[in-house]
């Protein structure tokens, strides 16, 4: 089986909104939103596949060569909140016309950015649902064909979000290297 590059998988998740785990509000719900991304993790990051993540004062742009780019803008479709030793990057989406948020945990370590996100096999979603149901309130939403199920998590505070993180809700992690300024 041919392996899909990890960063391309992240792009596919963002572009097609295939995330089956989403949140009703930006996370952590009682976390402090930041207004300047340059203070958090500025710069350009490159994956092993030469895909790019460009972070400016108020935008995060994900690009795959010249094929496509997805941009999140603070105050529009992006909310970034401090969390633990990193940040939760929340991109807005919709489920049946309702606003939801796709959460990613960004942690910068030296010159590497680690991005953790939820990516569960739809066939394993019932197992995930059982575990998270003991942690936070949630709602299960099926599309019209009942082919795609989304679980909308509703943590009430940072402690519940921490429990979700500890339970492994962010089950995939990719890393990118910071592009060094050219001399």
Image: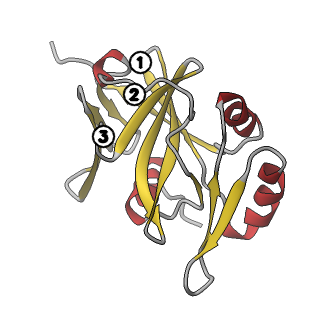
The residue that disc 3 covers is 52
The residue that disc 1 covers is 111
Query: At 40% across and 54% down in the image, what residue appears?
Result: 11
Query: At 65% across and 51% down in the image, what residue appears?
Result: 153
Left/right placement of residue 63 relative to residue 40 reads: left
Q: Quadrant of the C terminus?
A: top left
Image location of residue 64, percent across then percent down: 29, 51
Q: What kind of element bears circle 3?
A: strand
How far apart marks 2 and 1 lie (CA) works out to: 6 Å
The residue that disc 2 covers is 177
Label at residue 85: none
Q: Nearer the viewer, residue 66 or 61?
A: 61
Circles 2 and 1: CB atoms closer than 8 Å: yes
How far apart marks 3 and 1 lie (CA) works out to: 14 Å
Left/right placement of residue 87 relative to residue 160 reads: left
The first of marks 3 and 2 along the sequence is 3
Pick out the residue farthest to the left: 183
> Badge 2: how crowded within 10 Å, few (<14), some, or many (20+)?
some
């Amino acid at each position: 089986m041919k392996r899909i590059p990890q960063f391309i998988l992240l792009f596919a998740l963002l572009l097609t909104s295939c995330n089956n785990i989403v949140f009703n509000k930006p996370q952590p719900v009682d976390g402090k939103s930041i207004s300047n991304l340059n203070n958090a993790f500025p710069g350009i990051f490159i994956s092993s596949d030469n895909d790019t993540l460009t972070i400016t004062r108020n935008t995060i742009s994900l690009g795959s060569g010249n094929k496509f780019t997805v941009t999140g803008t603070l105050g529009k479709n992006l909310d970034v909140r401090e969390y633990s030793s990193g940040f939760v990057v929340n991109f807005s989406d919709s489920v049946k016309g309702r606003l939801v948020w796709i959460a990613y945990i960004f942690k910068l370590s030296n010159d590497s950015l680690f991005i953790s996100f939820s990516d569960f096999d739809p066939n394993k979603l019932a197992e995930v649902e059982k575990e998270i149901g003991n942690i936070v309130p949630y709602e299960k939403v099926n599309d019209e064909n009942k082919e795609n199920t989304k679980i909308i998590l509703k943590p009430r505070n940072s402690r519940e979000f921490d429990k979700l993180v500890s339970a492994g809700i962010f089950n995939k992690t990719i890393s990118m290297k910071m592009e060094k300024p050219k001399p």
